[in-house]
Image (cartoon, coloured by chain):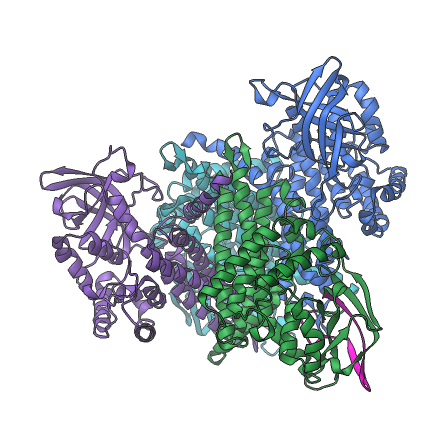
Chain colours: A green, B purple, C cyan, D blue
Amino acid sequence: MKISSAISDTELKTILTSTHNFVEQKLFPIEMDVIKMAWQDAKPILDNLRSEVKSMGLWCPQIPKTYGGLGLSNKEHGMVSEILGMSPIGHFVFNCQAPDAGNMEILMEFGTDYQKEKYLKPLLEGKITSCFSMTEPENAGSNPLMMNTTAVKEGEYYIINGHKWFTSSADAASFAIVMALTDPDNPEPYRRTSQIIVDTKASGFNQIRNIPIMGDEGSGYFSHAEIKYENCKTPVIGLLGPEGAGYQIAQTRLGPGRIHHCMRWIGICERAFGMMCQYAMQRQTSPGKVLAEKQTIQNWIAESRAEINASKLMVLDAAEKIDMYGQDKARVEISIIKFYVANVLQNVLDRAIQTHGGLGITDDTLLSWWYRHERGARIYDGPDEVHKSRVAKDILKSYKQQR
Amino acid sequence: MKISSAISDTELKTILTSTHNFVEQKLFPIEMDVIKMAWQDAKPILDNLRSEVKSMGLWCPQIPKTYGGLGLSNKEHGMVSEILGMSPIGHFVFNCQAPDAGNMEILMEFGTDYQKEKYLKPLLEGKITSCFSMTEPENAGSNPLMMNTTAVKEGEYYIINGHKWFTSSADAASFAIVMALTDPDNPEPYRRTSQIIVDTKASGFNQIRNIPIMGDEGSGYFSHAEIKYENCKTPVIGLLGPEGAGYQIAQTRLGPGRIHHCMRWIGICERAFGMMCQYAMQRQTSPGKVLAEKQTIQNWIAESRAEINASKLMVLDAAEKIDMYGQDKARVEISIIKFYVANVLQNVLDRAIQTHGGLGITDDTLLSWWYRHERGARIYDGPDEVHKSRVAKDILKSYKQQR
Amino acid sequence: MKISSAISDTELKTILTSTHNFVEQKLFPIEMDVIKMAWQDAKPILDNLRSEVKSMGLWCPQIPKTYGGLGLSNKEHGMVSEILGMSPIGHFVFNCQAPDAGNMEILMEFGTDYQKEKYLKPLLEGKITSCFSMTEPENAGSNPLMMNTTAVKEGEYYIINGHKWFTSSADAASFAIVMALTDPDNPEPYRRTSQIIVDTKASGFNQIRNIPIMGDEGSGYFSHAEIKYENCKTPVIGLLGPEGAGYQIAQTRLGPGRIHHCMRWIGICERAFGMMCQYAMQRQTSPGKVLAEKQTIQNWIAESRAEINASKLMVLDAAEKIDMYGQDKARVEISIIKFYVANVLQNVLDRAIQTHGGLGITDDTLLSWWYRHERGARIYDGPDEVHKSRVAKDILKSYKQQR
Amino acid sequence: MKISSAISDTELKTILTSTHNFVEQKLFPIEMDVIKMAWQDAKPILDNLRSEVKSMGLWCPQIPKTYGGLGLSNKEHGMVSEILGMSPIGHFVFNCQAPDAGNMEILMEFGTDYQKEKYLKPLLEGKITSCFSMTEPENAGSNPLMMNTTAVKEGEYYIINGHKWFTSSADAASFAIVMALTDPDNPEPYRRTSQIIVDTKASGFNQIRNIPIMGDEGSGYFSHAEIKYENCKTPVIGLLGPEGAGYQIAQTRLGPGRIHHCMRWIGICERAFGMMCQYAMQRQTSPGKVLAEKQTIQNWIAESRAEINASKLMVLDAAEKIDMYGQDKARVEISIIKFYVANVLQNVLDRAIQTHGGLGITDDTLLSWWYRHERGARIYDGPDEVHKSRVAKDILKSYKQQR
């Protein structure tokens, strides 16, 4: 949480403009190729771009200045994040990509000196990447109390056993932060789990596969792994915060993480919206007549613009509330943007594809990539339905007395 | 247009709190009775309340201080307007109701001294009310160029002939501002009409009926008249601005008028939302179980909250743009809120009614009144479809060159 | 239930054509006036029309020939019902209106000779009308087990106490069929209530008011009463079927009753659809251009046509299933049409109103009458939400074993 | 068009049951593997299955008995097609897959003896497959008059030049039926094109690539090619019907082709619906509680069931109209099902995916495959928007006189 901003309005404006120019000039021309490459081929290209970003002073926008970042508030970073979201490689190139950004945040807040030196430092420098290993195939991800993975302490080590999936980017990661039961019988259910840093090279850390998602297995950073922890032995010094604090630490990630995703989605929306408008002006439906003259297309443009504007104002409003009052006070707003913007994203992409006709379903534009890769937006970090129930229950509390 | 505000943040806060308290304590208890009364019975009750508002210093929030109002900017008045909108009699009691508010605005900007003294002054004081006579049954209201009513100058008089409807509040009005063709053959179509003040007692001003709208004929201020102008003779000094400026003057009303409606609708939404939540907590579906536990109701609460929040942020954003840059620069935003909020209003009312079950369709709550009286929201001041097309066409202009 | 039809295809065709002609020629020209009249003024007009229908041999289409009706199956009557639904006075004029049609059905199946002679005969002849008194303001209508009204036997009488509303048409009714608890402590909850015929002139049958619904209090047949039963004394011979059979008898009404409503709604849809198309072809948006050229209007026409076709096929399919296998076997289909068609009705009316612009919200067309009076369609006879849950639970039963 | 059916109800029932059993027992277990294979690996497996189908007497259900098929009417084949649609390999295995089925139809109706012997016979026997080459990247597919590909007659040959894409299954095809301008200046625009059979091995038939669609390039039958016809020389005896009849012949495919797609989509819907129900009953959201208890899931199940039922009844109704009156008379119905069912398909798949949570977006179930591969359903064979306009225009014709 950053109560006041480290930068001036003018500085922010400069950052936004430079970021926008960079994304447009350096990322747009190559992004389509990069996302189709194997990770080993994409990595050097992305590393070069990262060097440029560093040299331009735009590196790690979300990280406090003391840690070498730009020190932006949630709201300010939200604005940057929207711009980066316009390209599928934007966040990675600026080193504010999920899940690393969340891991950096946790490490800054809960990491020991040892952990900061060993894991946080190279992460911040962009020398390594990481992953976060929580969701289990056998348990509903929306219920944080349902978990089977255990970490049993034996001397200086935890022995971890369990089955995880959607451990995004594990394929390229140097370490994972693993959620596991350390005190499964604690009468207080939210004290049962801990977060433990595990080297991906540790014995018993068995990556089963990269899960093919909507036609893409992916690789490296662009992948989602299934992992079996089979008597995986990892030193106790990897424990984040006190034992039993797993759930509480996980909460830290959520608010800013959702702002991050929502603004990224808005970036995608803006890009798709621009593509839709441009194509509508170009594509002839009969000689001399273009798609843009069709009232249905006009409806889609107006509705999309309304929904994107609404999304942006609500996300920045939520980010400001986090900045000012902390994420607990912004709980309702955070849940609202999570489901609202995820649906706007799907709507806007769907309309852009429909506008493009046959071209829209080919992989010749980015639209189909996002259509496939962001169908998950309504599911990950809590499905729509869970967020809606939570919002309602929170709101209804203030009506209880009138029963 | 008010570039900077006449009041401080603290003053605004006080105004909002006082307004809220007044609406809740003085209007909520009687509003249901008042809207069912004949106008002659409602009038004295409303006049008493108006006196109270004056004595509390809350009168005419939207009017500049020099004219005796509070001098609020569009954004600030928007916030007041939301609160007033929670009651169907809110705006009238504070003397910022349509169509009078729009007429005051026109008179302040284009009125002669004579017109200001004779018409504006008593309007501002709340001694009279007025109406605006533009829409014609034979012509699509969405096309300002289609108009049959003519005003032919004969010496010191205009002779007006034409057929108008949806001349809201004519039944109680002292004067009408009439749109009529004064130069029907002008090659420039937007210079063909003028706005002319006409006394409702003038000969030839024939009120045919109050049009029954969704089951209510209404009366007095709460009605929508059909008028026949049959050789209606009215002095030329009633001409507003120069001859031929009818269309341009009409534009003046639109931006602030839409902010006004949108914020009023948001007030209705907030009230209906509160009723929905409260009823959901009270109504048992089986012993010990209430509606609020149903996930569908929870979905409606969350979706309504999202949509109302989005509406509010977008309307205040548009109001701020008008305040800062003028309504022409905020054209897209104004059209967006017009259709977006009108639909949110309909959704929220529909969900609130459905939550109330049988009770929802009775006239025992305000919900059915709004459901009926605000179905027009998606039609008046430009139907959704027209606004959507305009938004799209405006946006697409910046894509033209890429064709 | 009528397993096989009493009439040939040719006879059916003749009935449908005659009915269509009659509705168009005799009802369309006067319906708008009739629904605005007080009941005492409307009644003689309607009675004349009823005589005509009798003399044409179209009376009581849903009633078996042995009882003097046309003997149509549910499917066949559904087709007639669609035509009658095109006019708000159609069903009444053919004596197949709710709630009388349901009461006739119950009396035919469960009535004693005495009850048939005293109540059914004049109902069938159209000499009296009746009402059904079940829903209570204090209890959720969707839960048949929540009921407070009691009927305590004292000698040859029941003493009824309770509070009912939405007792439709009570204002004109000669008798009511009342649902009341006769055995409130029966361990089997569905055996607690009975249905008892009560004369509306009985002492203690106190009609509090006609509930104003969406702006209309109505009167006579066209009204929905609130009733207080205050020590209402009624002879035991009015008991329908055995004591405790109230719930089971109520079930009898449901299937055919829902077919009835659904087909009536489809009739309304067809009428509104026709009005929408016709207005779209007439209304100019600019000289020489009509609404029908707008793609949005075209979308509404196509979507409405699709939804109405779907509704009709599904309702007739459900009716056929009732005819062939009984309503229990058609439970899922009946619930599906109840919520599906009620929503189509609301959609089609909404689009027709929006197409009509300002005219659509006036009472100058039937659209606003239906918009107001059929908002209840998604609520009465079980709200959408209850039917959806029931459908799902029924379907999910066949998946249980795979758990 | 088949006015009366060649088979009895009992025969049909047997065909449906056998088909269902075969699909469930032989295709369900291997389909996931087959669709991920390269065509050369999948082909032998599919060919074995095809032999089984032949030996069971279920081969070519849509083909008249005189040509060796089952002789089913459009409605009957619709029922078979639904069952086949439940598996992505169903239609291919029964030799009624697009685009071959359409090509067979054209060849039966317009083919010369030579063409039937050379192309139709091996198609019917399943020895070869084919493709249909119409859509061009440079022209809106929805406008059949926009076409650049030309076929210029030189002696006994046509020289074809043009650029096509979405030439589905070209990768495995022995021949293509190509739409090309043979008389580009004909004043009657619908007489400008011809359909010409071209061997895919012909010189100048240059397959540029299989277009990657939503992440899948595919191969063989499961692919969509981009083709350049570069002075492609093909004998005039390949001309289908008279020169200039290209458009008219294309119409022949459309009606039955849309029934085919719609019923296939309904098969997909049924499969996805079953998966959704089954998963909802299995997946625990907390110990002892399953997804199926959530009202939102229940809503989806009920709404999906309603929409699938509506789809099925409408498609079979349209098929029956084609069988009885020809496809021209069923034009409105055909267009309605095309857009209605395509949207139901997308809704049902979306809900099934959302119900499956994370699993739904993986390629571990068929849902994601269909989600990706059927996004095109709203686009190919005429986008929703074009069909809606056509439906409306057709309907509005009967309202014209009232203008």
* Residue C226 x %, y %: 42, 67
- Residue drawn at 65 percent across, 80 percent down: A110
Could you say which quadrant of the image residue D119 lies in?
A: top right
* Residue B164 x %, y %: 26, 44
Q: Find the magenta span and give its range.
A: A141-167
* Residue C195 x %, y %: 55, 67
Asked if residue B331 lies left or right of residue D28, the reply is left
Residue found at the far top of this picture? D155
The residue nearer to you, when weighing A388 against C251, is A388
Could you say which quadrant of the image residue C190 lies in?
A: bottom right
The residue nearer to you, when weighing C268 against A78, is A78
Residue found at the far front of this picture? A55
Residue A377 seen in render: no
The residue nearer to you, when weighing D318 against D85, is D85
Determine if the magenta segment contains residue A148. yes
Q: Quadrant of the C terminus of chain C?
A: bottom right
Note whether D167 is above or below C383 in the view shown: above
Determine if the magenta segment contains residue D17. no
* Residue A60 x %, y %: 60, 67
Note whether A213 is above or below D226 in the view shown: below
The residue nearer to you, when weighing B218 against C4, is B218
- Residue drawn at 68 percent across, 79 percent down: A246
